[in-house]
Amino acid sequence: MCVPDKNLVVIPAYNEQASLPGTIAALQSLPDSFELLVVNDGSTDDTSRLARELAGGSRLPLHVVDLPLNGGIGVAVQTGYLFAAQAGRFRYVIQFDADGQHDAQAILTLVEACEDRHLDLCLGSRFLDARPGVFRSTAFRRAGIRFLAWLIGVLGRTHVTDPTSGFRCAGPRAWRDFAQRYPDDYPEPESLYWCIRNRLRVGEVPVRMFERVGGRSSIRSLRSLYYMVKVTLAIAVDLLRPKEASQP
């Protein structure tokens, strides 16, 4: 059986016209084994038009999928996994934010960690980077992240430091399942715990993150509290379900 030698970078984008050019430019330094996919999540600005213009000048193959409505980050990312499944030529699928917060060079680190450590899912953790001045979000969010890391650690007996990280690399065993079922609302900690509960191999590598270039976060003000309650309940419910992961 031929092992796919391409990797796909999925870039969910909702009203990211200000940051998308810089994000795509940064990704051009990746090797030719990578392709890019912008999933326009029902944006009301010029994200779609701009993405297609950028595709014309991209050194790497750049695909654009337009969703008719704003479905949220989970729907956008799952669209990327479905694209990978239908294409049939990708080994790893990397989630990469359009807002300029992620370091394009760290993509290679994530992929190498999956290869060397035989991981099904590798997270880029901002909390493992000890360099001074590294952006680690607000104090309130850091407290929420620590709580979710504790919850997942207790229930899954797996230590993680950045369960909400949207910078992650999924191997075929993980993303093929994600293409079939994926949380549509705040998916990162839920999908991480799903992997742990189903005995997929997960790990983390230190990455540098930056403050967003444009747009605004989907988690703000009172939604932060809703986020914590919703994710906690979702993980608790998932604990009661039977194993669902496909075999290697």
Image (cartoon, rainbow, N blue to C red):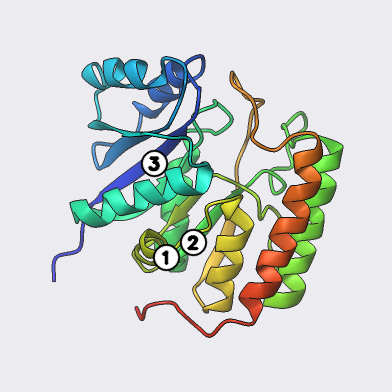
Front in this rendered view, residue 219 or 138: 219
Residue at image mark 2: 121
Front in this rendered view, residue 192 or 108: 192
Give the distance between the C-alpha atoms of the residues marked 3 and 2, in whole angstroms. 15 Å
| Residue 157 visible in the shown view | no
| Structural crowding at the residue carrying mark 2, measured as other residues with C-alpha within 10 Å and reported as few (<14), some (14–19) or many (≥20) | many
Instruction: Tell me the quarter of the picture where residue 237 sits.
Output: bottom right
Look at discs 3 and 2 and give the one toward the viewer.
3
Q: Callout 1, which amino acid?
A: Ala
Quarter of the figure with the N terminus: bottom left
Residue 164 lies, in percent from the top left, at: 65, 50
- On screen, residue 4 versus residue 11, left or right, reads left
Q: Secondary structure at mark 2?
A: strand
The first of marks 3 and 2 along the sequence is 3
Classify 209 as above or below 180: above
Q: Secondary structure at mark 3?
A: strand
Q: Callout 3, which amino acid?
A: Val
Residue at image mark 1: 174
Residue 160 lies, in percent from the top left, at: 68, 62
Task: Give the residue at x 45% y 36%.
Answer: 12
- On screen, residue 43 versus residue 89, left or right, reads right
Residue 155 lies, in percent from the top left, at: 72, 76
Residue at image mark 3: 10
Give the distance between the C-alpha atoms of the residues marked 1 and 3, in whole angstroms. 15 Å
| Residue 102 visible in the shown view | yes
Look at discs 1 and 2 and give the one toward the viewer.
1
- Is the C-beta separation of discs 1 and 2 under 8 Å? yes
Task: Give the residue at x 77% y 43%.
Answer: 224
Residue 86 disc label: none
Task: Give the residue at x 22% y 32%.
Answer: 61
